[in-house]
Amino acid sequence: MHIPARSLVVGNPAKVIKEVSDDMIAWKTKGTQLYQTLPKDMADTATPCEPLSEMPADRPTQESLYDTWNKIKNG
């Protein structure tokens, strides 16, 4: 099968579903750069701590934790 450059391919058997835009490549590149900084950020900022014995009443919902990613992705 010949797959044209900058094509998004899915499935088995493979099927070309669309051409990859410059915006898609920029978004993926930005996400990869963010991902690559995580190990160093963790090593620089991680500190030992005690595990929680119970759930804090003021703990944010799981959905609110996606706010930062949405700001990065859309910014």
Image: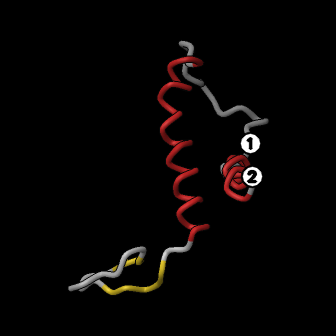
Which residue: 42% across, 74% down?
A: 6
- In the image: residue 23, left or right of residue 7: right
Q: Secondary structure at mark 2?
A: helix
Q: Position of residue 32 (x, y in %)?
A: 50, 48
In x, y percent, where is residue 5? 37, 75
The x and y percentages for residue 46 are 56, 18
Which-is-in-front pick, marks 2 and 1?
A: 2
* Rendering colour mode: secondary structure
Residue at image position (53%, 63%) is 25
Label for residue 60? Answer: 1
Q: Is residue 11 left or right of residue 60?
A: left
As rendered, which of 10 and 23 lies closer to the eye? 23
For the C terminus, the image quarter is bottom right
| Quarter of the rendering occupied by the N terminus | bottom left
Q: Callout 2 environment at 10 Å: few (<14), some (14 to 19), or many (20+)?
A: few
Q: Amino acid at mark 1?
A: Pro
Tell me: 24 left or right of 59.
Answer: left
Q: How many marks?
A: 2
Dot 2 or dot 1, earlier in sequence:
1
Nearer to me, 55 or 62: 62
Residue 59 location (% of width, % of height): 73, 37
Q: Nearer the viewer, residue 24 or 65?
A: 24
The residue at the far right in this view is 58
Q: Is residue 51 above or below residue 20?
A: above
Residue 55's quadrant in the figure? Answer: top right
Task: Find numbered disc 1 in the image and state the secondary structure of the residue it sits on.
Answer: loop
Q: Which mark is residue 52?
A: none
Residue drawn at x 59%, y 24% is 53
**Which residue, as the protein is rendered here, is positioned at the far left?**
1
- Name the amino acid, label 2: Lys
Q: Which residue is tagged 2?
A: 71
For residue 43, side relative to residue 68 (left or right): left
